[in-house]
Amino acid sequence: MPGLVLHAGAVLTCAHGGQVKFIPAQVRAQVSGTPICTMADQATVTGCPGVSGVVCTVVRWTNASARVTANGVPILVQAPPPPGPVPGGGTVAGPPPQVPLVVAMQLLVVAT
């Protein structure tokens, strides 16, 4: 699936406003001086106020490049966003699975 290459410096939130932070599994392949995210990365959520006492904790990204890899692991991609926050390519673990919102990311590098 073609899409914009997601990197660890991208700004994402859960549906409730919690901040999503990627912990890169590799640091050699970069875009804009920031490690590219791969399927091996961990993405955690902090600061989620939650719903009914259940808070978002992790993100499971599902959109990955079919052809481009970093250290042999498919890189994460996001469909080109329209202006404003848009749904990401994964789901957030928490009250029913929510789609993370991409607030800011690089818009130049595309992978297929």
Image (cartoon, rainbow, N blue to C red):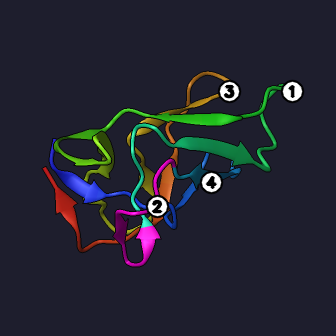
Sequence-wise, which precedes: disc 3 or disc 4? Answer: 4
Task: Tell me the CA gap for discs 1 and 4.
Answer: 22 Å
Front tag of 3 and 2: 2
Q: Pointer 2: what residue? A: 27
**Amino acid type at image mark 4:** Lys
Q: Which residue is mark 3?
A: 94
Place of residue 9 in the rendered image (x, y in percent of width and height, measured from the top left): 51, 67
Q: Amino acid at mark 2?
A: Val
Q: Which residue is mark 1?
A: 53
Residue 52 lies in quadrant? top right
Q: Residues within 10 Å of mark 3 (few under 14, many from 20)?
A: some
Depicted 40 relative to depicted 20: above or below: above
Q: Amino acid at mark 1?
A: Gly
**C-alpha distance separating marks 2 and 4:** 15 Å
**Which one is closest to the eye, mark 2 or mark 1?**
2
* Helix, strand or loop for disc 1: loop
Q: Nearer the viewer, mark 2 or mark 4?
A: 2
| CA distance for labels 2 and 1 | 36 Å
Residue that label 4 marks: 21
